Image: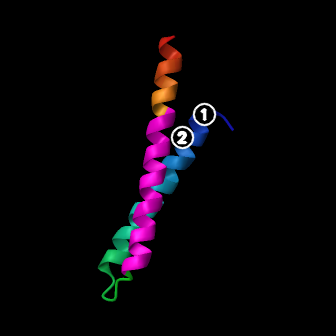
Amino acid sequence: MSLQSHLAELERRHMALQREIEKEELHPATDALKLHELKRRKLQLKDEISKLKTETASATVH
């Protein structure tokens, strides 16, 4: 898998988690633990995406 396709997949999963979080927040009986776990996973993906983008930018500069 190329770096670009890996980034695209991570971004797709990040957006899917965002949609799932929004859906969970709209539910009248929101499960706080589930919501917290979804947000934690989304943040992990965001961090991984940022790290890969930074590494890619650094590699193209050198």
Query: Mostly what secondary structure, the magenta segment?
Result: helix
Image vertical order of residue 10 relative to residue 50, above or below: below
Residue 56 sits above or below residue 30 on the image:
above
Q: CA distance from mark 2 to mark 1?
A: 6 Å
> Which residue corresponds to the image point at 41% horizontal and 54% vertical from the top-left?
43
Residue flagged by tag 1: what amino acid is it?
Answer: Leu
What residue do we see at 32% from left, 76% from top? 25
Identify the residue position indicated by label 2 in the image: 7
Query: Who is closer to the viewer here, 31 or 3?
Result: 31
Bounds of the magenta segment? 32-52
Report the residue at 51% width, 10% height from top.
Answer: 62
Classed neighbour count for the residue bearing mark 1: other residues with Cα under 10 Å, few (<14), some (14–19), many (≥20): few
Q: Secondary structure at mark 1?
A: helix
Q: Amino acid at mark 2?
A: Leu
Look at mark 1 in the image and give the residue it sits on.
3
Q: Is residue 35 on the magenta stretch?
A: yes
Residue 34's image quarter?
bottom left
Horizontal side of residue 29 vs 62, given as left or right: left
Q: How is the image coloured?
A: rainbow
- Look at the numbered discs 2 and 1 and tell me whether their residues touch, using CB distance below 8 Å: yes
For the N terminus, the quadrant is top right
Left or right, 30 with reference to 11: left
